[in-house]
Image: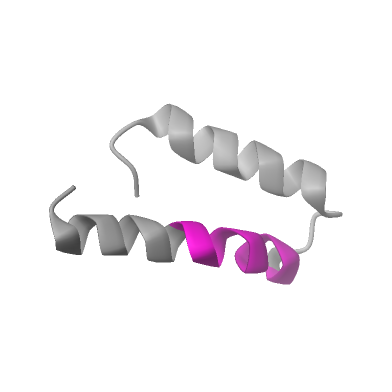
Amino acid sequence: MGDKPSDVQAAEAIGMRAYPFEEENLMTFLTPIFAWEEGRKLLGL
């Protein structure tokens, strides 16, 4: 995903705190992050 593993870990930690652990909820939280990362790659940022 990101350039820095710490970014991924931070996103996962926030997701875990924001929701009771359910994969559906975690994916709802992570989907915009994945989309942002993909957009960033496409723009070459």
Q: Is residue 14 left or right of residue 41?
A: right
Q: Nearer the viewer, residue 42 or 28?
A: 42
Q: Nearer the viewer, residue 45 or 9?
A: 45
| Residue pictured at 34% horizontal, 31% vertical | 4
Q: Is residue 11 left or right of residue 33?
A: right
Seen in the picture, residue 4 relative to 1 is either above or below; the reply is above
- Residue 17: name its quadrant: top right
Where is residue 35 drawn, in percent x and y? 40, 66
- Residue 40: name its quadrant: bottom left
| Residue pictured at 80% horizontal, 49% vertical | 18
| Residue pictured at 66% horizontal, 37% vertical | 13
Task: Report how many numbered discs are placed on residues in the image.
Answer: 0
Q: Main secondary structure of the magenta part?
A: helix
Its colouring scheme is one colour
The residue segment tinted magenta is 24-33
Seen in the picture, residue 6 relative to 27 is either above or below; the reply is above
In the orientation shown, which residue stands out farthest toward the left?
Answer: 44
Q: Residue 28 magenta-drawn?
A: yes
| Residue pictured at 28% horizontal, 37% vertical | 3
Where is residue 7 drawn, in percent x and y? 46, 34
Seen in the picture, residue 4 relative to 26 is either above or below; the reply is above
Seen in the picture, residue 35 relative to 44 is either above or below; the reply is below
Q: Is residue 30 left or right of residue 44?
A: right
